[in-house]
Image: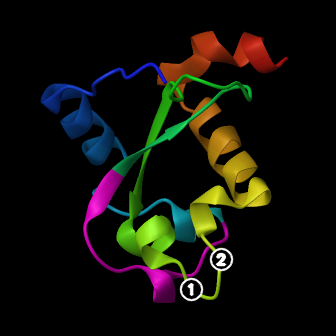
Amino acid sequence: MTRVRVTAERAAEVFTRDGYECLAPRLGGTIMDCWGRLRIEHVKVEPRMGQRGELLGTLCAGHTEDGMRAGFVWCTNAENRERMRDHLLSLPEYAHLREKVA
């Protein structure tokens, strides 16, 4: 897997852009599952192995692997992943990546 480190400056930009909140409740998840620290989630524009996603968004511990309940992890569900991808691609900073999915 190719590791591309997110700089502190880039992480601060992502947290600020997302309002220091978990994106899941905006995308159909429940705020009742929000808990713990926020983290940067990497989302791929198109599925492929060996690389981290170039789209960055914030999710809390409750909506990532830390929050697994009864085998369900919000961030790995295909439908939720697609919602997050669509949301992030709609942001102006990722306009240059929209052509990859068109």
The tag on residue 6 is none
Q: Residue furthest left?
A: 8
State the extent of the magenta-drawn residues as a range.
28-39
Image coordinates of residue 36 in percent, x first then y, are 28, 75
* Quadrant where the C terminus is found in the figure: top right
Tell me what residue is drawn at x 66 percent, y 40 percent.
85
Count of picture labels: 2
Relative depth, front residue between 18 and 24: 24
Q: Is residue 13 left or right of residue 43?
A: left
Q: Give the left or right position of residue 40, taking residue 30 as reference.
A: left
Quarter of the image for residue 96 reads top right
Indicate whether 99 appears above or below 75: above
Q: Secondary structure at mark 2?
A: loop
Kind of residue at badge 2? Phe
Q: Is residue 37 above or below residue 44?
A: below
Q: Is residue 99 left or right of residue 51?
A: right
The x, y position of residue 26, in whole percent, is 57, 64
Q: Image quarter for residue 91?
A: top right
Q: Which residue is mark 2?
A: 72
Label 1 sits on residue: 69
